């Protein structure tokens, strides 16, 4: 409870202004104040679990490239403990069985830690198999980690609860008074919508709640929502349904705030909504494309890998730097000591979002959700939700 309470408060705290370190706003890795340490002896290895096969293969490659980029930047600075950083990569297939076998193959190696995990099922199995420090990158179910059952595993991505909290925080910025909530597409979106409603009470006041099938008559859904006279409509669900709903709302004369969940940060939403997408808002995790402060890092990444980085690359970059810092603080490669350092990483070690911090329940303390708006057919940063005013 204490960890969740701390996280609730932390979600309203400033961090984006603290983007710094070699992954931040500089064109090159930040230079050490003294002479660069020359690699003294040998290598230090870190494990990477990524879906290199199957439907999520593109994301897996992005994750590995992000970790590779972090390793290269660390090596420019002399490595870790005077050793050259290298990676040991395994395919988890985004599946429990494959992930278990890959995690078991890493468990017997001398590693400074492991990062990865795009799918919840694969990450959950890996967290229960690995005996090394394990930073879960994209998978974000709070059930993946547990201080007792998975003492060395931590989430680096915000949970669905934190996504709901970010949406409610944004309602405060918009001074919303009357809220209509719609979800479509199943249990996940419905749970998110209900979390938003629970956190929003008593303000803004919930005036309408609808949970519908993805192929529902969204024009009728819009009419039902507007009958309650909301000034804000929140939608959780697939991008196509979101586009149809905002188009129906605008066609019916709604001129209030339309706020959608992260799935709507998609070309499919823009294409389906058409002109109605203008001025719509999306609450989504920060990515290299929607953080102006990450532009220089993204440019370096593109020059190195001949493509733009995805969010998985950014998460992997941050995770490897955090694992390296834990090893640096402990002074040795020791799973128990390295894991113990993760909850107390020193300020200023680098990475995005001011560095990773963890709550007592092993979820990430400060999530990275931001508010985007649609302008001229493109998504742009509207509110960092962690401004200097909190």
Image (cartoon, rainbow, N blue to C red):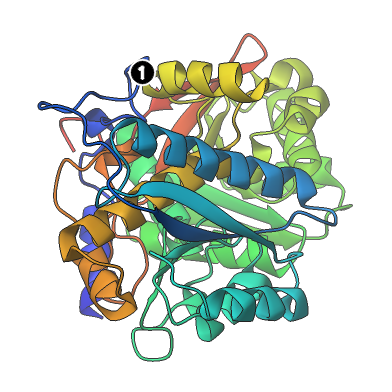
Q: Quadrant of residue 213?
A: bottom right
The one nearer the camera, 310 or 44, is: 44
The one nearer the camera, 145 or 331, is: 331
Helix, strand or loop under label 1: loop
- Give the residue displayed 74% in from the left and 40% down from the top: 239
With respect to residue 45, does 244 lie above or below? above
Q: In which quarter of the image is the C terminus?
A: top left
How many numbered discs? 1
Image position, residue 187 (x, y; %): 70, 69
Q: Name the residue under label 1.
A: 28
Q: Can residue 226 be seen in this view?
A: no
The one nearer the camera, 331 or 222, is: 331
- Give the residue displayed 34% in from the left and 45% down from the top: 169
With respect to residue 141, does 336 lie above or below? below
Furthest residue toward top: 376
Q: In this view, does 236 lie to the left or right of 275?
A: left
Q: In this view, does 218 lie to the left or right of 298?
A: right
Furthest residue toward front: 41
Image position, residue 14 (x, y; %): 21, 39
């Amino acid at each position: 409870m204490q960890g969740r309470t701390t996280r609730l408060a932390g979600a309203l705290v400033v961090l984006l202004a603290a983007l710094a370190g070699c992954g931040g706003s500089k064109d090159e890795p930040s230079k050490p104040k003294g002479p660069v340490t020359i690699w003294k002896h040998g290598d230090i290895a870190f494990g990477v679990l990524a879906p290199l096969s199957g439907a999520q293969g593109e994301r897996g490659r992005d994750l590995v490239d992000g970790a590779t980029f972090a390793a290269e930047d660390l090596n420019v600075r002399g490595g870790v403990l005077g050793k050259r950083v290298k990676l040991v990569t395994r395919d988890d297939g985004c599946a429990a069985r494959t992930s278990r076998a890959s995690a078991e193959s890493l468990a017997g190696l001398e590693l400074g830690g492991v990062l990865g995990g795009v799918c919840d099922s694969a990450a959950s199995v890996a967290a229960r198999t690995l005996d090394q420090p394990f930073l879960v990158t994209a998978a974000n179910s709070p059930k993946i980690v547990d201080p007792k059952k998975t003492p060395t595993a931590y989430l680096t991505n915000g949970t669905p609860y934190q996504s709901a909290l970010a949406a409610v925080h944004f309602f405060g910025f918009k001074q919303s008074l009357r809220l209509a909530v719609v979800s479509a597409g199943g249990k996940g979106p419905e749970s998110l919508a209900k979390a938003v409603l629970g956190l929003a009470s008593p303000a803004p006041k919930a005036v309408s709640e609808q949970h519908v099938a993805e192929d529902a008559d969204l024009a009728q859904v819009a009419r039902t929502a507007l009958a309650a006279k909301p000034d804000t409509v929140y939608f959780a669900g697939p991008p196509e349904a979101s586009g149809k709903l905002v188009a129906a709302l605008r066609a019916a004369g709604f001129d209030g705030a339309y706020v959608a969940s992260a799935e709507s940060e998609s070309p499919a939403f823009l294409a389906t909504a058409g002109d109605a997408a203008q001025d719509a808002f999306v609450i989504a995790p920060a990515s290299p494309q929607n953080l102006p402060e990450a532009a220089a890092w993204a440019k370096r990444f593109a020059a190195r890998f001949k493509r733009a980085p995805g969010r998985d690359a950014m998460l992997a970059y941050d995770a490897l730097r955090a694992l390296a810092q834990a090893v640096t603080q402990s002074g040795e490669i020791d799973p128990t000591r390295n894991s113990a350092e993760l909850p107390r990483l020193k300020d200023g070690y680098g990475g995005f979002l001011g560095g990773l911090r963890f709550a007592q329940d092993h979820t990430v303390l400060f999530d990275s959700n931001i508010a985007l708006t649609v302008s001229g057919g493109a998504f742009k940063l509207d509110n960092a939700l962690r401004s200097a005013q909190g």
